[in-house]
Image: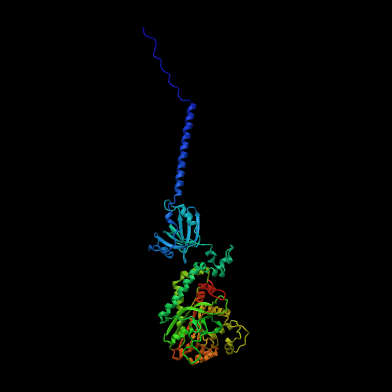
Amino acid sequence: MADSNTDAVPEQPAGPSKSELKKRAKAAEKERKAAERAAKQAELAQQQAANEIDYSTEFYGVLPLNQSQTRTRRERSQISTLSSRDGETVLLRARVQTSRAKSSKLLFLNLRQRTHTVQAVLMVDPEKISKQMVKWASGLADESIVLVEGLVKKSPTPIQGATISDVEIDVKQIHLISGIDGRLPFSLEDASRPEAEIESSENQFNRVLIDTRLNNRVVDLRTQTNQAVFRIQAAIGDLFRDYLSKHGFIEIHSPKLQGAATESGASVFKVSYFKGALTRLPLDLEVTMTFLGNAYLAQSPQLAKQMAIAADFERVYEIGPVFRAEDSNTYRHMTEFIGLDLEMAIEEHYHEVMETLDGLFLSIFRGLRDNYQHEIETIRKQFPAEEFKWREGPEGTLRLTHREAVQMLIDDGVEIGITDDMKWVLNSLSMTATINPLYSTENEKRLGRLVKAKYDTDYFIIDKFPMEIRPFYTMPDPEDPTVSNSYDFFMRGEEILSGAQRIHDPKLLSEKMRSKGVDPDSMRSYVDAFRMGCTPHGGGGIGLERVVMLFLKLNNIRRASLFPRDPKRLDP
């Protein structure tokens, strides 16, 4: 019989419950989220660590004090040349004119060299330009001097506020050469603003007064306007020298300390000098030691120029300081200025000198027009002015006699004053007049306006001045002794040169000196120079700063003087 008993099947263990499965799922999700959080934290920590690592430390910072420790001889670039250097890496030294941070990662700098500016851009670039570098550069004060290396890049649109507007510099390195210790007395932006903009704008701009400028002249001279003004001034000196050198003149250097006043004792500076210094006496002695310890600052190189002609130098010129002790606090007078003087031998007529001077001025005007338009335009942004005009046609420079100039004023309604200087005019015209000096500044300007309206020129010559208003060494006219062989040159209605034929005969010279109240024996060396025989000669003296002021229409001669000297200013 078969066994009815079978093997028993073992029971299978029961699976996790739904509740357990949910628990496990939650735990796994929690672990996953924790892992993600840990990963993110690790990533953030890594990024923060990376940010704290400044990988640009070599590319910015303060340079050591320059004590000429090294010399790499690497070329330094000029901002003015950058337009033609697209794609080149350049190294340049400049001032920070302005800076503008757009964010913690982007900075714009306006860099300046004299009259030229260019925009520079500093932007965070991984492994190259750090945020720390941008932040440091953002803190540079205006007018700091920096050394910048960067890539020149063409700009798709003109950059406003930069004179070099077609390129910018992508900055790779920037180092501080010299910072600012203290606070600027005024911003260069305020110092460069045109007066018309200040008057017309609704904004409250800071007006920088001329005394404030002159008290802080070093900062004031940094403006692009002033940089251009003194480039023009230097150019006039160069053009003066070039023209005269090409016409046979040589440069001389006369002393500025003299034993006697050269023209008028009332307008000379007296200074202490060594007692017992050698001087000439009004006696028949060659030299004696009786100088009483006084000397005078030269009012001009006039006497030395003439003595050089007597020494057969034939044609001479000088550029040097001139001193005038006149208490004139006007817009066009200074107690010290730079004189451009010349003297030359005459073959037949003093107009040879006048024509040489005319050619000189025309050469200067053309040189400025043809070679310094950038500077002229820079100045006109702050000091708008009509272009200076002169006649270049076959008719030549306008020449008027003094009588003709007086008549133009009379015809325009000017009442001629009864002055010693002008008695001859009144007598010749059989007129009576009220007190009103003819050659006041107002009437000079008025004559300039009349000439401009009638002849369309800002530059003209007046010839044949009355003898009694000219210095003792001026040669009288051969036909009318009340008139002299003298002339003045004018720009925009103001005198910029006075000149004449000089007296080269010692007898006539002594006579004229006495008539002007000057003792010939007090200037014996000068008079004796003509006793040994002297060529007929003439010349003129030009005020450099006045030419600059009038050509550019700066309205105040102090703007044309580096560190002006007037009755109220000896510093800086």
Q: Position of residue 21 (x, y in %)?
A: 47, 28
Relative to 265, is 35 above or below?
above
* Residue farthest to the top, as pictured: 1
Q: Is residue 549 left or right of residue 90?
A: right
Q: Position of residue 333 (x, y in %)?
A: 55, 77
Relative to 533, is 222 above or below?
above
Q: What colouring does the structure picture have?
A: rainbow
Relative to 371, is 154 above or below?
above
Query: Which residue is at the front of the view, 181 or 331?
Result: 181
Quadrant occupied by the N terminus: top left
- Residue ID at (47%, 37%): 34
Answer whether residue 480 is visible to the viewer in this image: no
Query: Which residue is at the front of the view, 351 or 524?
Result: 524
Q: Position of residue 461 (x, y in %)?
A: 50, 82
* Residue farthest to the right, as pictured: 434
What count of labels does the image hold?
A: 0
Answer whether residue 65 is visible to the viewer in this image: yes
Query: Which residue is at the front of the view, 225 or 178?
Result: 178
* Residue farthest to the left, as pictured: 1
Q: Position of residue 134 (x, y in %)?
A: 47, 54
